[in-house]
Amino acid sequence: MLLTGCGGGNRADGAGASPKPSVATTPTTVVGTAPTTGAPTIVPITAVPAFAASVAPVTAADLGESWRDGCPVGPDQLRRITLSYWDFDGVARSGALVVNADVADAVTTIFRRLFDQRVPIRRIEPVDRYAGSDDASMAADNTSAFNCRRAVTTGPAQWSAHAFGRAIDVNPVENPYVLGGEVLPPEGAPFVDRTTVRTGMAVPGNPLVEAFAASGWQWGGRWTGSPDYQHFSADGS
């Protein structure tokens, strides 16, 4: 992931959970036989939540501290996607990502796949909820996309792919960025060892990695030397 701390700071477990997405309302029943009387019984079946997503334009005010004058893209080039996801407790929730308009359809498709596969995601909130701090967003294990910031790299200063809204960091604590001897976020240190697969991790061939690969997005976990396990981008940067 190329970011100023790659994927998100102070463990914001206090951030409120977002509301659950709407579910299908058509009632379904199962007809059985009561064990003693032989009378039919009606047993309601709980409807499974359906994936939902909506795309909307954003303004500079909507972006808060995640955008400023001089950024490589303007608010008119960005879109806010409100979408469904499954949290770590298996509860369907609704979150929001800000992405470039030119990848909005692809991102919607990717997160539909993740929802269909019930891939667990800790939380999904725009970085402006963390005052534009990538470190704070990562420490909160927040999945995020657009943030106008420089890449976190040992090379020359350059814009991160996140500054264009064409990269997404997923579950940054479970999928840290290992930059030399530094682990970003530091809370991700227990997950540097990738031999034991735990909830929320991105590993080769699993549904999280494959959902992005199916849309042609590349995974930073394949980078040699400094793997960025949380980072997925449209162009590999």
Image (tube, rainbow, N blue to C red):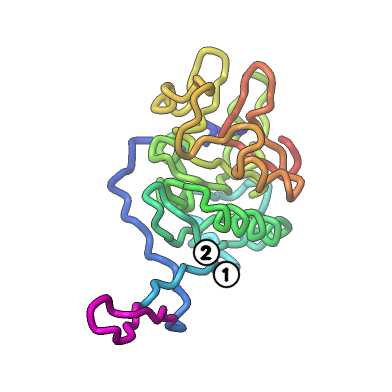
Amino acid type, label 2 = Thr
Q: Name the residue at 42% across, 40% down.
A: 141
Q: Residue furthest left?
A: 36
Amino acid type, label 1 = Ser
Cβ–Cβ below 8 Å for labels 2 and 1? Answer: yes
Q: Give the residue at mark 1.
A: 54
Q: Residue furthest bottom?
A: 39
x and y, in percent, of residue 162 in the image: 62, 43
Res. 103 image quadrant: bottom right
Q: Give the residue at mark 2.
A: 82
Image quadrant occupied by the N terminus: top right
Q: Name the residue at 54% across, 66% down.
A: 51
Magenta-drawn segment = 28-43
Res. 208 image quadrant: top right
The foreground one among 76 and 16 is 16
**What's the distance in space between the residues labelled 2 and 1, CA to CA?**
5 Å
x and y, in percent, of residue 20 in the image: 40, 65
Q: Is residue 106 left or right of residue 139?
A: right
Looking at the image, is 149 positioned above or below residue 121?
above
x and y, in percent, of residue 85 in the image: 49, 57
Image quadrant occupied by the C terminus: top right
Classify mark 2: helix, strand or loop. strand
Q: Name the residue at 53% across, 23% down.
A: 194
Give me the disc on residue 102: none
Please tell me how crowded label 1 is: few (under 14), some (14-19), or many (20+) other residues with Cα within 10 Å. Answer: few
Q: Would you say residue 37 sits in the magenta stretch?
A: yes
Classify mark 1: helix, strand or loop. strand
Q: Is residue 199 left or right of residue 216?
A: left
The foreground one among 31 and 208 is 31
